[in-house]
Amino acid sequence: MTFDFDEIDTIEHQDPEELAARLEATGGYRVLRRVTARTHIHEPDGTATRRGIYLDVETTGLDSATDEIIELAMVPFDFSDDGRIFAIHASFDALRDPGRPIPAAIAALTGITDAMVAGTSIDSAEVACFLRSTALVVAHNAGFDRPFCERFCPAFASTAWACSWREIPWSKEGFDGTKLSQLAAGHGLFFDGHRAVEDCRAGIEILSRPLPRTGRTALTALLESACQSAPKFDPVSASNFDPFERRVLVVALASSELAGVAETWRARVA
């Protein structure tokens, strides 16, 4: 692909999308587009929606029993049962002083330094308030994020979770890897990784996109996984509950702090 001198002189004034399309049309280039902070993906059309939250944490290490959260980000979004994402709401993003030096490897990975977190804190009551009316928390490797969050704020223990890493068949859809950055690149996107709120925005964008082979959105695949994995309760029927409610009930019934929920649930479906 070539430009004449007039094009070179005026290239900075041309539409970047037009330039990207021209490059891609040659077959010799692939252009990645930056994930931006969007306020919506689909316009409201009267479809009933639920509130989801995409969550990410940065921590001092891998052990949820001894390491600490140093950044927590949550980006709420409204979604329908058919896997569409509508409004994307204002994020929660806060740093937290772990009370000890951040390991050099963690600082290098996340860009979060001791100076940045010095004297900062996250109010667990504020986090619990932010979670109200949330039907589903999504994280990319929820098995890592969830124990840290539940230890920090008990409200996370009574919230349904889903994992965008494990519960979507990325390899069957043709993706070479399952890191968030790899999935983004597979959709022609890039973002500034290893900062929590940027990861969340990228995660929502990826969930909204059609998968290459089946054509369903990644969120649809995730919701289908939720339906398949949500347990059925016996001897009392749980047919009055959808998969998100059943996931919440599994958490609640297993929690000694919420032991009374079992009788409340049984009374509701009796």
Image (cartoon, rainbow, N blue to C red):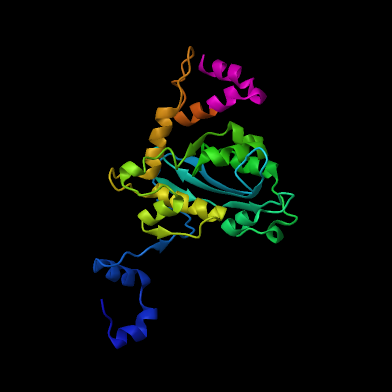
Question: Where 208 falls versus 192 (above or below)?
Answer: above
- Splitting the image into 4 quarters, where does residue 256 fall? top right
Residue 265 colored in magenta in the image: yes
Q: Could you tell me residue 150's position as x and y percent?
A: 62, 36
Task: Inspect this view and state whether residue 216 appears.
Answer: no
Q: Is residue 96 left or right of residue 50?
A: right
Q: Could you tell me residue 3's position as x and y percent?
A: 28, 81
Q: Could you tell me residue 193's position as x and y percent?
A: 51, 57
Q: Is residue 78 left or right of residue 173?
A: right
Q: Is residue 79 left or right of residue 57?
A: left
Question: Where 38 falls versus 175 (above or below)?
Answer: below
Find the residue positioned furthest to the left: 26
Question: Where 75 falls versus 235 (above or below)?
Answer: below
Q: Nearer the viewer, residue 107 or 36?
A: 107
Task: Tell me which residue sits at (45%, 27%) in the image.
Answer: 230
Q: Nearer the viewer, residue 17 or 101?
A: 101
Q: Nearer the viewer, residue 131 or 178?
A: 178
What segment carries the magenta color?
Answer: 249-270
Task: Tell me which residue sits at (69%, 41%) in the image.
Answer: 125
Task: Tell me which residue sits at (32%, 72%) in the image.
Answer: 19
